Amino acid sequence: MLYDFAIIGAGVTGTAIARELSKYKVSAIVIEKLSDVACETSKANSGIIHAGYDAPSGSWKAKMNVRSNPLYDDICKELYIPFRRLGSLVVALAGQGTDYIEELYQHGVERDIPVEIIKELSQIKKMEPNITDDVEVVLHAPTAGVISPFTLAIALAENANINGVEFVFNAPVQAIENMGKFFIVDTPGKSFQARAIINASGLFADEISRMAGDESFKITPRKGEYILLDKMGDYVRKVLFPVPTKKSKGILVSPTVDGNVFLGPNARDQDSKLDNSTSLHGLDEVIEGGRKLIPRIPLVESITNFAGLRAVSSTNDFIIGESKVTPKLFQAAGIQSPGLSSCLGIAEEVVDAVKASGIELKLKENFNPTREKPIVFAELPWSERDALAQWNKQFGHIICRCETVTEGEIVQAIRRPVGARTVDGVKFRTRVGMGRCQGGFCTPRVIKILARELGVEEDEIVKREPSTKYFFGETKEFRQPRAASVNGSEVARP
Protein backbone atom coordinates (compact mmCIF):
# COMPACT_ATOMS: atom_id res chain seq x y z
CA MET A 1 0.00 0.00 0.00
CA LEU A 2 1.17 3.52 -0.76
CA TYR A 3 0.33 5.76 2.22
CA ASP A 4 -0.02 9.49 1.97
CA PHE A 5 2.02 9.91 5.17
CA ALA A 6 4.39 7.82 7.26
CA ILE A 7 4.85 9.33 10.72
CA ILE A 8 8.01 8.00 12.34
CA GLY A 9 7.76 8.02 16.12
CA ALA A 10 4.83 7.48 18.49
CA GLY A 11 5.63 9.83 21.34
CA VAL A 12 3.39 12.75 22.26
CA THR A 13 4.54 14.68 19.19
CA GLY A 14 4.01 11.82 16.74
CA THR A 15 0.62 10.89 18.17
CA ALA A 16 -0.50 14.54 18.22
CA ILE A 17 0.43 14.85 14.55
CA ALA A 18 -1.36 11.56 13.80
CA ARG A 19 -4.51 12.83 15.49
CA GLU A 20 -4.35 16.17 13.65
CA LEU A 21 -3.86 14.45 10.28
CA SER A 22 -6.75 12.08 11.00
CA LYS A 23 -9.08 15.06 10.57
CA TYR A 24 -8.32 14.92 6.84
CA LYS A 25 -9.04 12.49 4.01
CA VAL A 26 -5.59 10.92 3.97
CA SER A 27 -4.01 7.53 4.60
CA ALA A 28 -1.39 7.55 7.32
CA ILE A 29 0.66 5.08 9.33
CA VAL A 30 2.69 5.64 12.50
CA ILE A 31 5.90 3.58 12.56
CA GLU A 32 7.33 3.06 16.06
CA LYS A 33 10.50 1.16 16.88
CA LEU A 34 9.38 0.23 20.41
CA SER A 35 6.40 -1.81 21.58
CA ASP A 36 3.91 0.95 22.39
CA VAL A 37 3.28 4.67 22.27
CA ALA A 38 5.22 6.97 24.60
CA CYS A 39 7.91 4.40 25.44
CA GLU A 40 10.88 6.74 25.41
CA THR A 41 11.18 10.50 26.11
CA SER A 42 7.40 10.91 26.43
CA LYS A 43 7.08 8.47 29.32
CA ALA A 44 9.85 9.91 31.48
CA ASN A 45 9.36 13.63 31.77
CA SER A 46 7.84 16.07 34.24
CA GLY A 47 4.28 15.97 32.87
CA ILE A 48 4.00 19.75 33.09
CA ILE A 49 2.04 22.00 30.75
CA HIS A 50 4.06 25.19 30.97
CA ALA A 51 2.41 28.60 30.87
CA GLY A 52 4.77 29.76 28.10
CA TYR A 53 6.73 32.71 29.52
CA ASP A 54 10.13 31.01 29.73
CA ALA A 55 11.46 30.26 26.22
CA PRO A 56 13.32 32.99 24.28
CA SER A 57 11.08 35.37 22.36
CA GLY A 58 10.74 34.46 18.69
CA SER A 59 11.80 30.84 19.20
CA TRP A 60 9.72 27.87 18.10
CA LYS A 61 9.66 26.85 21.75
CA ALA A 62 7.97 30.09 22.78
CA LYS A 63 5.55 30.20 19.85
CA MET A 64 4.46 26.59 20.16
CA ASN A 65 4.10 26.69 23.95
CA VAL A 66 1.92 29.80 23.82
CA ARG A 67 -0.12 28.35 20.95
CA SER A 68 -0.62 24.97 22.63
CA ASN A 69 -1.38 25.83 26.25
CA PRO A 70 -4.99 26.97 25.69
CA LEU A 71 -5.73 23.92 23.52
CA TYR A 72 -5.42 21.50 26.43
CA ASP A 73 -8.77 22.28 28.01
CA ASP A 74 -10.82 21.21 24.99
CA ILE A 75 -8.75 18.21 23.94
CA CYS A 76 -8.65 16.82 27.48
CA LYS A 77 -12.44 17.08 27.65
CA GLU A 78 -12.85 15.44 24.23
CA LEU A 79 -10.49 12.56 24.99
CA TYR A 80 -11.16 12.15 28.74
CA ILE A 81 -7.60 12.96 29.78
CA PRO A 82 -7.05 14.02 33.43
CA PHE A 83 -5.58 17.54 33.47
CA ARG A 84 -5.15 20.01 36.33
CA ARG A 85 -4.42 23.72 35.90
CA LEU A 86 -2.91 24.15 39.34
CA GLY A 87 -0.49 26.95 38.42
CA SER A 88 3.26 27.33 38.87
CA LEU A 89 5.68 29.40 40.93
CA VAL A 90 9.19 30.40 39.90
CA VAL A 91 10.94 30.81 43.24
CA ALA A 92 13.74 33.31 43.78
CA LEU A 93 15.55 32.79 47.07
CA ALA A 94 17.10 35.48 49.23
CA GLY A 95 20.23 36.81 47.56
CA GLN A 96 19.25 35.72 44.03
CA GLY A 97 17.66 39.05 43.19
CA THR A 98 14.55 39.77 41.22
CA ASP A 99 15.99 40.59 37.79
CA TYR A 100 15.19 37.22 36.23
CA ILE A 101 11.71 37.15 37.75
CA GLU A 102 11.09 40.58 36.23
CA GLU A 103 12.34 39.35 32.84
CA LEU A 104 10.03 36.33 32.89
CA TYR A 105 7.16 38.58 33.97
CA GLN A 106 7.74 40.85 30.96
CA HIS A 107 7.76 37.79 28.67
CA GLY A 108 4.40 36.80 30.10
CA VAL A 109 2.90 40.25 29.62
CA GLU A 110 4.20 40.47 26.03
CA ARG A 111 2.73 37.04 25.24
CA ASP A 112 -0.62 37.76 26.90
CA ILE A 113 -0.01 35.07 29.55
CA PRO A 114 -1.53 35.69 33.00
CA VAL A 115 1.39 36.21 35.40
CA GLU A 116 1.94 38.07 38.66
CA ILE A 117 4.89 38.82 40.91
CA ILE A 118 4.31 38.11 44.61
CA LYS A 119 6.71 39.38 47.30
CA GLU A 120 4.69 39.02 50.50
CA LEU A 121 5.86 35.92 52.37
CA SER A 122 2.46 35.48 54.03
CA GLN A 123 0.73 35.43 50.63
CA ILE A 124 3.28 32.99 49.21
CA LYS A 125 2.89 30.72 52.25
CA LYS A 126 -0.86 30.79 51.87
CA MET A 127 -0.46 29.45 48.35
CA GLU A 128 2.30 26.97 49.21
CA PRO A 129 2.53 26.35 52.98
CA ASN A 130 5.62 24.11 52.92
CA ILE A 131 7.77 26.32 50.72
CA THR A 132 11.14 27.44 52.09
CA ASP A 133 11.27 30.45 54.41
CA ASP A 134 14.18 31.71 52.26
CA VAL A 135 11.84 32.65 49.41
CA GLU A 136 12.13 36.33 48.50
CA VAL A 137 9.82 36.63 45.50
CA VAL A 138 7.85 34.33 43.18
CA LEU A 139 6.38 34.54 39.71
CA HIS A 140 2.90 33.01 39.72
CA ALA A 141 1.50 31.64 36.43
CA PRO A 142 -2.02 30.23 37.00
CA THR A 143 -2.37 28.65 33.54
CA ALA A 144 0.39 26.09 34.12
CA GLY A 145 -0.84 22.56 34.71
CA VAL A 146 0.01 18.90 35.07
CA ILE A 147 -0.94 15.95 32.91
CA SER A 148 0.16 12.34 32.40
CA PRO A 149 2.30 12.37 29.23
CA PHE A 150 1.70 8.71 28.42
CA THR A 151 -2.06 9.05 29.02
CA LEU A 152 -2.04 11.97 26.60
CA ALA A 153 -0.15 9.97 23.95
CA ILE A 154 -2.37 6.92 24.40
CA ALA A 155 -5.54 9.02 24.05
CA LEU A 156 -4.22 10.79 20.94
CA ALA A 157 -3.23 7.45 19.41
CA GLU A 158 -6.60 5.88 20.17
CA ASN A 159 -8.46 8.78 18.60
CA ALA A 160 -6.18 8.83 15.55
CA ASN A 161 -6.70 5.10 15.13
CA ILE A 162 -10.49 5.43 15.44
CA ASN A 163 -10.26 7.96 12.62
CA GLY A 164 -8.25 5.70 10.33
CA VAL A 165 -4.56 6.09 11.19
CA GLU A 166 -2.69 2.78 11.36
CA PHE A 167 0.02 1.95 13.90
CA VAL A 168 2.87 -0.53 13.66
CA PHE A 169 5.15 -1.30 16.63
CA ASN A 170 8.49 -3.06 17.14
CA ALA A 171 9.46 -1.64 13.76
CA PRO A 172 12.76 0.28 13.98
CA VAL A 173 13.51 2.14 10.76
CA GLN A 174 16.65 0.74 9.15
CA ALA A 175 16.75 2.70 5.91
CA ILE A 176 14.78 5.25 3.89
CA GLU A 177 14.97 5.34 0.10
CA ASN A 178 13.78 8.42 -1.75
CA MET A 179 12.14 7.27 -4.98
CA GLY A 180 11.25 10.78 -6.13
CA LYS A 181 7.46 10.59 -5.92
CA PHE A 182 7.46 8.49 -2.77
CA PHE A 183 9.69 7.09 -0.02
CA ILE A 184 10.36 3.48 0.95
CA VAL A 185 10.78 3.05 4.71
CA ASP A 186 12.49 -0.23 5.59
CA THR A 187 11.94 -1.99 8.94
CA PRO A 188 13.08 -5.50 9.97
CA GLY A 189 9.93 -7.31 8.91
CA LYS A 190 8.35 -5.05 6.35
CA SER A 191 8.80 -2.02 4.11
CA PHE A 192 6.32 0.85 3.91
CA GLN A 193 5.76 3.25 1.04
CA ALA A 194 4.60 6.82 1.61
CA ARG A 195 4.34 10.00 -0.43
CA ALA A 196 5.58 12.04 2.53
CA ILE A 197 7.45 11.39 5.78
CA ILE A 198 6.92 13.18 9.08
CA ASN A 199 9.94 12.81 11.33
CA ALA A 200 8.84 12.79 14.98
CA SER A 201 11.43 10.29 16.18
CA GLY A 202 12.74 12.12 19.24
CA LEU A 203 16.26 11.14 20.23
CA PHE A 204 16.82 9.55 16.83
CA ALA A 205 15.39 12.35 14.69
CA ASP A 206 18.81 13.30 13.33
CA GLU A 207 19.43 9.70 12.24
CA ILE A 208 16.03 9.41 10.54
CA SER A 209 16.58 12.78 8.86
CA ARG A 210 20.00 11.65 7.64
CA MET A 211 18.51 8.45 6.18
CA ALA A 212 16.11 10.65 4.21
CA GLY A 213 18.93 12.88 2.94
CA ASP A 214 18.92 15.81 5.38
CA GLU A 215 21.99 16.13 7.63
CA SER A 216 21.30 19.68 8.79
CA PHE A 217 21.09 19.04 12.55
CA LYS A 218 22.30 16.80 15.34
CA ILE A 219 20.53 15.51 18.45
CA THR A 220 22.33 15.27 21.81
CA PRO A 221 20.71 13.24 24.62
CA ARG A 222 20.31 15.13 27.89
CA LYS A 223 19.56 12.98 30.91
CA GLY A 224 17.24 14.09 33.68
CA GLU A 225 16.84 12.06 36.88
CA TYR A 226 13.73 12.04 39.07
CA ILE A 227 12.58 10.83 42.47
CA LEU A 228 8.88 9.96 42.73
CA LEU A 229 7.11 10.14 46.09
CA ASP A 230 3.83 8.53 47.13
CA LYS A 231 0.52 10.40 47.15
CA MET A 232 0.73 13.15 49.77
CA GLY A 233 -2.49 15.13 49.62
CA ASP A 234 -1.76 18.84 49.13
CA TYR A 235 1.71 18.83 50.69
CA VAL A 236 2.87 20.44 47.43
CA ARG A 237 0.11 22.38 45.70
CA LYS A 238 1.75 23.95 42.66
CA VAL A 239 4.58 23.34 40.23
CA LEU A 240 7.64 24.87 41.93
CA PHE A 241 10.56 26.00 39.76
CA PRO A 242 13.86 27.46 40.96
CA VAL A 243 15.41 30.34 39.05
CA PRO A 244 16.47 28.45 35.87
CA THR A 245 19.94 27.90 34.48
CA LYS A 246 21.08 28.31 30.86
CA LYS A 247 20.80 24.53 30.40
CA SER A 248 17.48 23.73 32.07
CA LYS A 249 14.57 24.97 34.11
CA GLY A 250 16.33 23.52 37.14
CA ILE A 251 15.36 20.92 39.71
CA LEU A 252 11.72 21.40 40.60
CA VAL A 253 9.18 19.97 43.01
CA SER A 254 5.70 19.29 41.69
CA PRO A 255 2.55 17.29 42.18
CA THR A 256 1.58 14.88 39.42
CA VAL A 257 -1.89 14.73 37.94
CA ASP A 258 -2.46 11.50 39.92
CA GLY A 259 -1.53 13.03 43.28
CA ASN A 260 2.07 11.91 43.69
CA VAL A 261 4.95 14.35 44.17
CA PHE A 262 8.26 14.32 42.29
CA LEU A 263 11.65 15.98 42.55
CA GLY A 264 13.79 16.61 39.46
CA PRO A 265 15.11 16.64 36.88
CA ASN A 266 18.78 17.46 36.81
CA ALA A 267 20.41 17.92 33.40
CA ARG A 268 23.46 16.06 32.07
CA ASP A 269 24.42 15.79 28.41
CA GLN A 270 25.71 12.39 27.33
CA ASP A 271 26.64 10.44 24.20
CA SER A 272 24.37 7.43 24.67
CA LYS A 273 20.77 7.60 23.44
CA LEU A 274 19.98 4.41 25.35
CA ASP A 275 21.44 4.94 28.84
CA ASN A 276 18.59 6.04 31.09
CA SER A 277 20.10 4.74 34.33
CA THR A 278 20.07 6.73 37.54
CA SER A 279 23.13 7.41 39.67
CA LEU A 280 23.73 8.03 43.36
CA HIS A 281 25.41 11.35 42.56
CA GLY A 282 22.55 12.40 40.31
CA LEU A 283 19.86 11.52 42.84
CA ASP A 284 21.76 13.36 45.57
CA GLU A 285 21.77 16.38 43.26
CA VAL A 286 17.99 16.05 42.80
CA ILE A 287 17.43 15.83 46.56
CA GLU A 288 19.62 18.87 47.22
CA GLY A 289 17.78 20.87 44.56
CA GLY A 290 14.35 19.82 45.81
CA ARG A 291 15.15 20.74 49.40
CA LYS A 292 15.99 24.30 48.35
CA LEU A 293 12.29 24.69 47.52
CA ILE A 294 10.66 22.37 50.08
CA PRO A 295 13.20 21.90 52.90
CA ARG A 296 11.22 19.27 54.81
CA ILE A 297 10.22 17.17 51.84
CA PRO A 298 9.54 13.69 53.30
CA LEU A 299 11.89 11.45 51.35
CA VAL A 300 10.63 8.49 53.37
CA GLU A 301 7.66 8.64 50.97
CA SER A 302 9.89 7.88 47.98
CA ILE A 303 8.58 4.91 45.97
CA THR A 304 10.87 4.89 42.91
CA ASN A 305 13.39 6.84 40.87
CA PHE A 306 13.93 7.00 37.13
CA ALA A 307 15.61 8.98 34.37
CA GLY A 308 14.49 10.31 31.02
CA LEU A 309 16.43 11.52 28.01
CA ARG A 310 15.64 14.79 26.28
CA ALA A 311 16.33 15.32 22.57
CA VAL A 312 18.42 18.52 22.40
CA SER A 313 18.98 19.78 18.87
CA SER A 314 22.13 21.51 17.68
CA THR A 315 19.96 24.60 17.10
CA ASN A 316 18.78 24.47 20.74
CA ASP A 317 15.28 24.99 19.41
CA PHE A 318 12.51 22.91 17.92
CA ILE A 319 12.98 22.09 14.23
CA ILE A 320 9.58 22.23 12.55
CA GLY A 321 8.50 22.24 8.92
CA GLU A 322 9.46 20.87 5.53
CA SER A 323 13.12 20.02 5.07
CA LYS A 324 15.04 22.52 2.95
CA VAL A 325 17.05 19.63 1.56
CA THR A 326 14.52 16.81 1.05
CA PRO A 327 11.08 17.79 -0.29
CA LYS A 328 8.12 16.06 1.39
CA LEU A 329 10.19 15.31 4.50
CA PHE A 330 8.57 17.20 7.36
CA GLN A 331 10.51 17.69 10.58
CA ALA A 332 9.21 17.73 14.15
CA ALA A 333 12.64 17.34 15.75
CA GLY A 334 14.58 18.56 18.77
CA ILE A 335 11.40 18.48 20.83
CA GLN A 336 12.77 18.93 24.32
CA SER A 337 11.12 21.02 27.05
CA PRO A 338 8.59 22.54 26.61
CA GLY A 339 7.82 19.79 24.11
CA LEU A 340 4.94 18.20 26.01
CA SER A 341 3.39 21.63 26.49
CA SER A 342 3.84 22.38 22.78
CA CYS A 343 2.90 19.15 21.00
CA LEU A 344 -0.64 20.19 20.05
CA GLY A 345 0.60 23.39 18.43
CA ILE A 346 3.46 21.53 16.77
CA ALA A 347 0.92 19.15 15.22
CA GLU A 348 -1.03 22.08 13.81
CA GLU A 349 2.16 23.71 12.54
CA VAL A 350 3.30 20.52 10.78
CA VAL A 351 -0.08 20.19 9.07
CA ASP A 352 0.20 23.85 8.03
CA ALA A 353 3.63 23.08 6.55
CA VAL A 354 2.17 20.12 4.67
CA LYS A 355 -0.46 22.39 3.15
CA ALA A 356 2.15 25.02 2.30
CA SER A 357 4.20 22.39 0.43
CA GLY A 358 1.42 21.97 -2.09
CA ILE A 359 -0.10 18.77 -0.70
CA GLU A 360 -3.87 19.13 -0.77
CA LEU A 361 -5.70 18.21 2.42
CA LYS A 362 -9.47 17.94 2.58
CA LEU A 363 -11.30 17.78 5.90
CA LYS A 364 -13.40 14.73 6.68
CA GLU A 365 -17.10 15.19 7.19
CA ASN A 366 -17.21 12.34 9.71
CA PHE A 367 -14.17 13.04 11.92
CA ASN A 368 -14.84 11.79 15.45
CA PRO A 369 -13.09 14.08 18.00
CA THR A 370 -13.77 11.86 21.02
CA ARG A 371 -12.93 8.40 22.34
CA GLU A 372 -14.81 6.08 24.64
CA LYS A 373 -14.22 7.15 28.24
CA PRO A 374 -12.06 4.62 30.09
CA ILE A 375 -13.59 3.19 33.25
CA VAL A 376 -11.49 4.15 36.28
CA PHE A 377 -12.87 2.07 39.15
CA ALA A 378 -11.07 3.97 41.93
CA GLU A 379 -12.72 7.25 40.91
CA LEU A 380 -16.29 5.94 41.06
CA PRO A 381 -18.59 6.36 44.08
CA TRP A 382 -19.22 3.14 45.97
CA SER A 383 -22.74 2.75 44.60
CA GLU A 384 -21.42 2.81 41.03
CA ARG A 385 -18.57 0.44 41.89
CA ASP A 386 -21.09 -2.05 43.25
CA ALA A 387 -23.32 -1.74 40.18
CA LEU A 388 -20.33 -2.14 37.87
CA ALA A 389 -19.14 -5.27 39.68
CA GLN A 390 -22.66 -6.70 39.50
CA TRP A 391 -22.75 -6.01 35.75
CA ASN A 392 -19.30 -7.54 35.14
CA LYS A 393 -17.60 -9.51 37.90
CA GLN A 394 -14.18 -8.61 36.51
CA PHE A 395 -14.72 -5.12 37.93
CA GLY A 396 -15.14 -6.69 41.36
CA HIS A 397 -11.72 -8.37 41.20
CA ILE A 398 -8.96 -6.04 42.46
CA ILE A 399 -5.62 -6.77 40.80
CA CYS A 400 -3.56 -3.78 41.98
CA ARG A 401 -4.23 -3.06 45.65
CA CYS A 402 -2.10 0.09 45.82
CA GLU A 403 -4.01 1.88 43.05
CA THR A 404 -7.31 -0.08 43.29
CA VAL A 405 -7.22 -1.30 39.69
CA THR A 406 -9.56 -4.10 38.68
CA GLU A 407 -9.32 -6.98 36.24
CA GLY A 408 -12.04 -5.29 34.20
CA GLU A 409 -9.89 -2.19 33.68
CA ILE A 410 -6.94 -4.31 32.56
CA VAL A 411 -9.09 -6.21 30.06
CA GLN A 412 -10.45 -2.87 28.86
CA ALA A 413 -6.89 -1.55 28.33
CA ILE A 414 -5.96 -4.58 26.25
CA ARG A 415 -9.09 -4.47 24.07
CA ARG A 416 -9.13 -0.72 23.35
CA PRO A 417 -7.83 0.72 20.05
CA VAL A 418 -4.01 0.55 19.99
CA GLY A 419 -4.40 -1.61 23.09
CA ALA A 420 -1.82 -2.83 25.59
CA ARG A 421 0.33 -5.81 24.63
CA THR A 422 2.91 -5.67 27.42
CA VAL A 423 2.94 -5.30 31.21
CA ASP A 424 4.14 -1.71 30.87
CA GLY A 425 1.41 -1.09 28.31
CA VAL A 426 -1.16 -2.10 30.91
CA LYS A 427 0.67 -0.07 33.56
CA PHE A 428 0.58 3.16 31.54
CA ARG A 429 -3.13 2.75 30.76
CA THR A 430 -4.39 1.74 34.20
CA ARG A 431 -1.70 2.66 36.79
CA VAL A 432 -1.25 -1.01 37.69
CA GLY A 433 2.14 -1.25 39.42
CA MET A 434 2.53 2.48 40.00
CA GLY A 435 1.75 2.42 43.71
CA ARG A 436 3.95 1.94 46.76
CA CYS A 437 4.78 -1.72 46.08
CA GLN A 438 5.72 -0.91 42.46
CA GLY A 439 4.11 -4.03 41.01
CA GLY A 440 5.33 -6.51 43.62
CA PHE A 441 1.84 -7.88 44.17
CA CYS A 442 0.06 -7.36 40.85
CA THR A 443 2.64 -8.11 38.13
CA PRO A 444 2.12 -11.93 38.04
CA ARG A 445 -1.62 -11.39 37.86
CA VAL A 446 -1.27 -8.89 35.00
CA ILE A 447 0.86 -11.42 33.11
CA LYS A 448 -1.88 -14.05 33.46
CA ILE A 449 -4.55 -11.66 32.19
CA LEU A 450 -2.43 -10.53 29.23
CA ALA A 451 -1.69 -14.12 28.23
CA ARG A 452 -5.34 -15.07 28.46
CA GLU A 453 -6.60 -12.07 26.50
CA LEU A 454 -3.92 -12.27 23.80
CA GLY A 455 -4.17 -16.05 23.46
CA VAL A 456 -0.48 -16.71 24.16
CA GLU A 457 1.58 -18.52 26.79
CA GLU A 458 2.56 -16.61 29.92
CA ASP A 459 6.26 -16.91 29.11
CA GLU A 460 5.62 -14.89 25.92
CA ILE A 461 4.50 -11.83 27.89
CA VAL A 462 7.23 -9.19 28.29
CA LYS A 463 7.67 -6.10 30.42
CA ARG A 464 8.21 -3.70 27.53
CA GLU A 465 10.29 -4.88 24.57
CA PRO A 466 10.84 -8.44 23.25
CA SER A 467 14.12 -8.63 25.20
CA THR A 468 12.54 -7.75 28.58
CA LYS A 469 11.31 -11.24 29.46
CA TYR A 470 10.02 -12.37 32.83
CA PHE A 471 10.54 -16.12 32.38
CA PHE A 472 13.76 -17.87 31.49
CA GLY A 473 13.19 -21.37 32.79
CA GLU A 474 12.49 -23.39 35.90
CA THR A 475 14.02 -22.02 39.10
CA LYS A 476 15.91 -25.26 39.75
CA GLU A 477 17.68 -24.90 36.40
CA PHE A 478 19.40 -21.77 37.68
CA ARG A 479 20.55 -23.13 41.05
CA GLN A 480 24.31 -23.25 41.45
CA PRO A 481 25.88 -26.56 42.57
CA ARG A 482 26.73 -26.61 46.27
CA ALA A 483 29.79 -28.24 47.74
CA ALA A 484 29.48 -31.03 50.36
CA SER A 485 32.25 -32.60 52.39
CA VAL A 486 32.60 -36.41 52.27
CA ASN A 487 35.48 -37.93 54.25
CA GLY A 488 37.32 -34.61 54.19
CA SER A 489 36.93 -34.08 50.44
CA GLU A 490 34.53 -31.67 48.75
CA VAL A 491 32.15 -33.08 46.17
CA ALA A 492 29.55 -31.25 44.12
CA ARG A 493 25.92 -31.94 44.83
CA PRO A 494 22.73 -30.58 43.29
Image (spheres, rainbow, N blue to C red):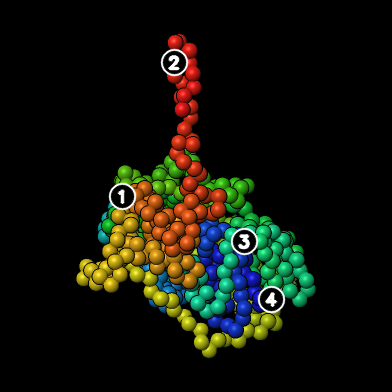
Q: In this view, does 43 lie above or below 286?
A: below
Contact, mark 1 vs mark 3 (Cβ under 8 Å) = no
| Secondary structure at numbered mark 3 | loop
The amino acid pointed to by label 2 is: Ser
The amino acid pointed to by label 1 is: Asp
Tell which tag, 2 or 3, sits nearer the viewer: 2
Toward the top, the furthest residue is 488
Residue 78 bears which disc, if any?
Answer: none
The amino acid pointed to by label 4 is: Leu
Q: Could you tell which of marks 2 and 3 lies nearer the N-terminus?
A: 3
Residue 133 bears which disc, if any?
Answer: 1
Tell which tag, 1 or 2, sits nearer the viewer: 2
Q: Could you tell which of marks 1 and 3 lies nearer the N-terminus?
A: 1
Q: Could you tell which of marks 2 and 4 lies nearer the N-terminus?
A: 4
Alpha-carbon neighbours of circle 2 within 10 Å: few (<14), some, or many (≥20)? few
Identify the residue under disc 2.
485
Which residue occupies 61% across, 47% down? 272
Disc 1/disc 3 C-alpha distance (Å) = 52 Å
Q: Could you tell which of marks 4 and 3 lies nearer the N-terminus?
A: 4
Disc 4/disc 3 C-alpha distance (Å) = 18 Å
The amino acid pointed to by label 3 is: Ala
Toward the bottom, the furthest residue is 365
Q: Do we see residue 141 in this rendering?
A: no
